[in-house]
Amino acid sequence: MSNEGIQEISGFRTRVIVAVLHRLFAFTRGMTLGVRAACFDEQGRIFLVRHTYVPGWYLPGGGVEHGETVAIALAKELREEGNLEINGEPHLFQVYQNSRASKRDHVILYRVNVRQTAPRAPDREIAESGFFSLDQLPVDVTAATLRRLGELSGERPKQEIW
């Protein structure tokens, strides 16, 4: 079997596992909470990630685990997904309901200035990552990411649904 075939099978398995975990969390937790960040470098470029298990480019982030504060989860996710350190204070932008994941899932979005300590090497979770000029985004940026960028720029009103 070719490497591409193996990667497709691995990606499918990961998507199935993620879907099962979301359903499990819906039964075992009253609410799920995630953090994401619009991360800007000194040149005003946005940091995006492309995962191995879902198509498209996203703002970095992840779940707030049991016993974690939102601030700790935010710093951890940015470090894990991009080797990013937060410069200054994160600015809370909006809290969204992510009804696509579950009716009990919420995402907290921050706007942060960051510094990358080293380029992020691809692995089993992150296929690619990088900083992009807002007028030269990758072709397959997700619709939700584009909506968030429109809200951040003031080109569209803030929404409450992710």
Image (cartoon, helix red, strand yellow):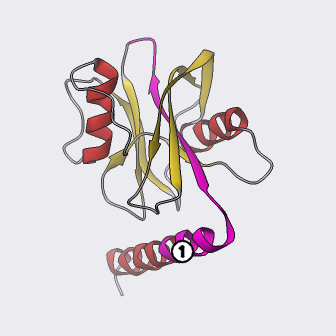
User: Relative to residue 48, is residue 93 depicted above or below?
Assistant: above
- Residue at 24% over, 46% down: 143
Residue under pointer 1? 23
Q: Is residue 129 visible?
A: yes
Picture quarter containing residue 83? top right
Quick check: is 128 in the magenta stretch?
no
Residue closer to the observer: 4 or 24: 24
Task: Please name the amino acid that badge 1 sits on.
Answer: Arg
Quadrant where the C terminus is found in the figure: top left
Q: Residues within 10 Å of mark 1 (few under 14, many from 20)?
A: few
Residue closer to the observer: 43 or 65: 65
Q: Is residue 117 visible?
A: no
> Which residues lie in the magenta part?
19-43
Percent x, y for residue 23?
A: 54, 74
Picture quarter containing residue 96? top left
Percent x, y for residue 146?
A: 26, 37
Residue at the far right in the pictured view? 67
Percent x, y for residue 135?
A: 19, 24
- Residue at 60% over, 75% down: 24
Percent x, y for residue 116?
A: 55, 26
Quick check: is 29 in the magenta stretch?
yes
- 135 displayed left or right of 38: left
| Secondary structure under the numbered disc 1 in the rendered image | helix
Picture quarter containing residue 28? bottom right
